[in-house]
Amino acid sequence: MTESFDVVIVGGAVIGSAAAFFLAEALPRSARVLVLEADTGYAHCATTRSLASIRHQFSTPENVRMSMFGTEFLRHAGARLEVNGEAPLIGFVEAGYLFLATAAGWATLQCNHAVQRAEGAQVALLGGEALAARFPWLATGDLAGGSLGLAGEGWLDAHGLMHGLQRKARSLGVQVRAGRVEALLREGSRIGAVRLADGSTIGCGTVINAAGTGAAALARTAGIELPVQARKRCVFHFRSPEAAPGCPLVIDPCGLYFRPEGAGFLCGMAPPEDEDPECSDFDVPPGWFEDRLWPLLAQRVPGFEAARPLSSWAGHYDVNVFDHNVILGAHPQIDNLLFANGFSGHGLQQSPAIGRALMELVLHGGFRSLDLGALGWQRVLQNRPLREVNVV
Ligand SMILES: Cc1cc2nc3c(=O)[nH]c(=O)nc-3n(C[C@H](O)[C@H](O)[C@H](O)COP(=O)(O)OP(=O)(O)OC[C@H]3O[C@@H](n4cnc5c(N)ncnc54)[C@H](O)[C@@H]3O)c2cc1C
């Protein structure tokens, strides 16, 4: 072994870059932090294939708090991530989410609303008539109402955030290298080193698993079973001759979502569970837009009858099949391996909160700002799921 680092971060997309940034800010300049990234083009990671949106409308207080910190971070990211007078282009648009509910889902929406309000989120419940008055382009006949984010929710440039975090971390001394970690070399209750695909090894004080959908394979090399699987999610870009003024990110009761993007719109929907196997390819299934999404779009927004598809892509959600929430922190069997995996579709918006939390775990051995203890391994090992109801 020729080299050793205080912290080795495996995976350099948004979570790895956020951890690197917060560590670089907090640690003395003499500390050695290394990010190892298998694909420095970031062609297939979830971060760059994401819908890149942020909401406060979750059912779990921890998720609301993390996203609220995400908003604060995004609002000031230009100044915080500036390097040599140049601020990153993050393109944060605060335009809100609108969760719609039929009579069947209204009680759940109200319940979630109470959780969000208790955390200080600025959200409002609108009945059917108020919805129709505010969004006249929306078909509301079957709806009991909706929950609208009034501030702090919206969308951003995911690549811009990742790049900005990484660039700032580098400017503060973090090293970022191309390299696939093939194995975590375990010595009893510690990881002594990581082994790369070229056979070289690098010693480590702490290792952070930020490998996204590669996290379970990485954990397995250290004898840990991480319940995270890749699930395909497709996003479709379309244009519509009919405008939808003031359109937020709309979540239909059937699971369909859509939001503006430039002069057009993005939309998508999770497949039913029995059509959602673990996946490895990035093919967009034929007919998804025309046969499945378009009829639903036109049902909710009659003006979308004239929608025209422009392009599409597939990405992989890093799904925690245990309870759809991140698994954060050390496994009781290994002291110096920190996990931040299984975001199940909401990792981009949580990246600032998770980066800060990982920094606190490395520096202090515990959380200092948000208490995210409920998101640790104990719940998995003791079979106590912390379920997030609002998974999109
Ligand atoms: C279609 C889609 C829409 C989404 N929409 C949203 C949204 O609107 N809002 C939101 O908050 N989240 C969204 N997400 C989820 C979000 O993108 C992810 O949760 C988040 O990007 C996870 O970041 P990450 O850094 O953990 O993983 P990734 O972005 O997947 O990055 C993992 C990195 O680790 C590297 N890696 C893996 N294994 C190794 C190894 N062994 N050695 C070295 N490097 C390795 C990979 O090359 C990759 O670059 C969406 C995801 C998808 C797919």
Image: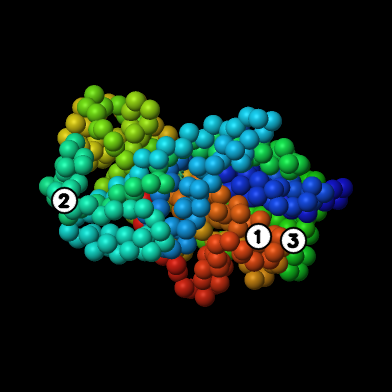
Colour option used: rainbow
The dot on residue 360 is 1
First reached walking from the N terminus: tag 1 or tag 3: 3
Q: Residue at x 43, y 57 (%)?
A: 64
**Residue 5 drawn at (x, y percent):** 79, 51
Return the residue at label 3: 191
Residue 111, disc = none
User: Disc 2 and disc 3: Cα gap in Å?
Assistant: 56 Å
Mark 2 vs mark 3: which is more N-terminal?
2
Mark 3 beta carbon near ligand 1 (under 8 Å): no
* Left or right of 113 in this view: 36: right
Residue ID for mark 2? 128
Disc 2 versus disc 3: nearer the observer? 2
Residue 30: give x, y in percent of width and height.
82, 49
Secondary-structure class at tag 2: helix
Task: Give the residue type at disc 1.
Answer: Glu
> Could one spot residue 321 in this view of the protein?
no
Label 1 and label 3: CA atoms lie apart by: 19 Å
Furthest residue in direction bottom, as rendered:
382
Residue 168 in percent (x, y) is at: 67, 39
Front-most of residues 96 and 36? 96
Query: In the displayed structure, would residue 358 be above or below residue 48?
Result: below
Say whether mark 1 is within 8 Å of ligand 1: no
Q: Which residue is drawn at 51% across and 52% down?
A: 69
> Cα distance, mark 2 to mark 1?
45 Å
Among numbered discs 2 and 1, the one appearing first in the sequence: 2
1 or 3: mark nearer the eye: 1
